[in-house]
Amino acid sequence: MGNREDVVVVSGVRTPFSKFGGVLREMHSTDLGVIVIKESLRRAGLKGEDLDEFYYGMCDQAEAALYDNVNGRQALLRAGLPETLVSLTIDRACCSSLCAVHLGRRAILLREADTCMAVGAENMSNTPLLMNGHRWGGGMKPLLVQDYLNPITYREYTPLARDAGEIAIEYGVSRAEQDQWALGSQEKWALADEAGKFDEELVPVEVPQKKGTFLFKKDEFPKPDTTLEGLAKLKTIYGSPTVTAGNAPGLDAGAAAVILMRRAKAEEMGIKPLATIVSVASGASQPRRMAELPGFVIQKALDRAAISVDDIKVVEINEAFAAVTLVSTKILAGRDEKKWRELLERTNPNGGAIAIGHPVGASGARILMTMMYELRRRDGGFGVCAICGGLAQGDAVVIRVDS
């Protein structure tokens, strides 16, 4: 039994993740958000009226504009939640939905809420092209069309793939090691999928077709035919010394939702907690050093929980690039080679974003629930997850699952 004031997770669900240009390419991410909102409530045995606050993470604001923005508010209304429910739409890059978990936890600890929902949704395939500077007419000026997904649009900042590769080299993490990790991500996902390990977290999506609907119920991005030889042949991207399309995730689509409650409220309603949130942490750094952030914020969260990385049974670090996971675990291991290798054995045991996909607004909530369900299969213990975000942001969460 935990403290009645603990913040606990009582539901965690996600859609399958779709690849860039894949089966979900024409579905707005808000439609995916509606699906996980409804299903997370159903699984917890809750109604919309039971929610006190609602947080919605989304990074791709160009796609948000297709539905006139404030997509959190729009999603909750379309899901049939009360019109009086307070909501907040968050853009904290890839950290957005894990930040939503942080904010829900904070509201509960401050006794401003008993039950909060944290959602993340993204469809990078549905991102429009941008035309700017032409509202007032351009005369003979050539029409400029900009792709919102092009990382070079950070302008004064270098592309994320280049940054991650350069930081990896600083830490002695080679291209070959990144390719090996990418292959392992695909292999671990395949084994987990075969064993049905994702069944607890997935809700199918009915995708409209010309005739009827298609039931999308399995991650679309994994590449089971990946080989080390094939990965080694790929060219690096955006001027990176090590990052390729093979050791990076895709530009994906999907949604995820997590419901948080005060333990006392869950007990009052007869709801069994799935996990307890022990601590959280956030951080930021020099923009090009994004690959380090998960390592730093995990250590910060562990310190707040008064435990060490040796107490952790499962680690989930979002594979924004293989470089991020490898650099951050090396930081946690204090650059001790033996400890690093041992820590990698506990990291992303069912594969990560390189295989599953990375719909950026949804990934933070996804790594939290994937870790939570894995701990439950392992009879409990401590787990920690972390995700980095563009221009070097990071969020982490430590949880405990009771056996």
Image: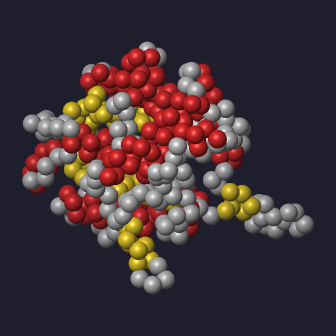
Closer to us: 136 or 43 = 43
Closer to us: 268 or 358 = 358
The relative height of residue 40 versus residue 182 in the rendered view (above or below) is: below
**Location of residue 177 in the rendering, given as x and y in whole percent from the top left corner:** 53, 30
Residue displayed at 66% across by 50% down: 150
Q: Residue 99 occupies which quadrant of the picture?
A: top left
Residue sitting at the far bottom: 211
Scheme of image coloration: secondary structure
Residue displayed at 34% across by 31% down: 346
**Location of residue 295 in the rendering, given as x and y in whole percent from the top left corner:** 44, 27
Q: In this figure, what is the number of numbered marks?
A: 0
Q: Quadrant of the C terminus?
A: top left
Residue displayed at 38% across by 60% down: 218
Look at the image and tell me whether residue 171 can be seen. Answer: yes
The relative height of residue 375 versus residue 272 in the rendered view (above or below) is: above
**Location of residue 251 in the rendering, given as x and y in whole percent from the top left corner:** 55, 53
